[in-house]
Image (cartoon, grey):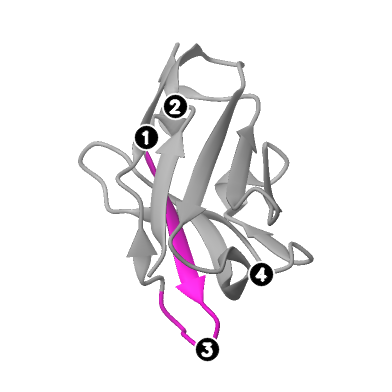
Amino acid sequence: QVQLVESGGGLVQAGGSLRLSCAASGSTFSRYAMGWFRRAPGKEREFVAAIGRSGDTTTYADSMKGRATISRDNAKNTVYLQMNSLKPEDTAVYYCAARELGSNSWGHWGQGTQVTVSS
């Protein structure tokens, strides 16, 4: 079973950038598609971005298109989320998730990392 640990969150001014990382352990990383989700205060968790097992396919929420890039390094068992032009409404706890080959659900989650964007 894969374990996920996020890092890279913090406080940034509007217009700034952050790169989140998610380190995976405990299983074969390349068996998992990886995704990023977020939950803002008082709101439900929402999808941010996802990347296929080999990194050849990516998808983004409309709100993040053009501002975020998801990538992965299978040699380092790590997935990244580069976010640029951050807005106060991007403030949320960001979670890394893994979907195993053959599964249609995000069955593994990290503990989250806080991103706060000040205006």
Q: Which mark is residue 102?
A: 3
Quadrant position of the C terminus in the picture: top left
Magenta highlight range: 94-105
In the rendered structure, which disc, 2 or 3, sits on the residue that comes first in sequence?
2
In the rendered structure, which disc, 2 or 1, sits on the residue that comes first in sequence?
2
Residue 106 in the magenta stretch? The answer is no
Would you name the residue on which mark 4 appears?
53
Residue at x 41%, y 52% (from the top left corner): 4
Under mark 2, the amino acid is Gly
In front: 27, or 46? 27
Q: Are marks 2 and 1 in contact (CB under 8 Å)?
A: yes
In the rendered structure, which disc, 2 or 4, sits on the residue that comes first in sequence?
2
Under mark 4, the amino acid is Arg
Rendering coords of residue 23 (x, y %): 50, 46
Residue at x 57%, y 46% (from the top left corner): 63
In the rendered structure, which disc, 3 or 4, sits on the residue that comes first in sequence?
4
Rendering coords of residue 1 (x, y %): 37, 70
At mark 1, the secondary structure is strand
Mark 4, other Cα within 10 Å: few <14 / some 14–19 / many ≥20: many
Mark 1, other Cα within 10 Å: few <14 / some 14–19 / many ≥20: many
Mark 3 → mark 4, Cα distance in angstroms? 12 Å
Mark 3, other Cα within 10 Å: few <14 / some 14–19 / many ≥20: few
On the image, which quarter does residue 84 sit in?
top right
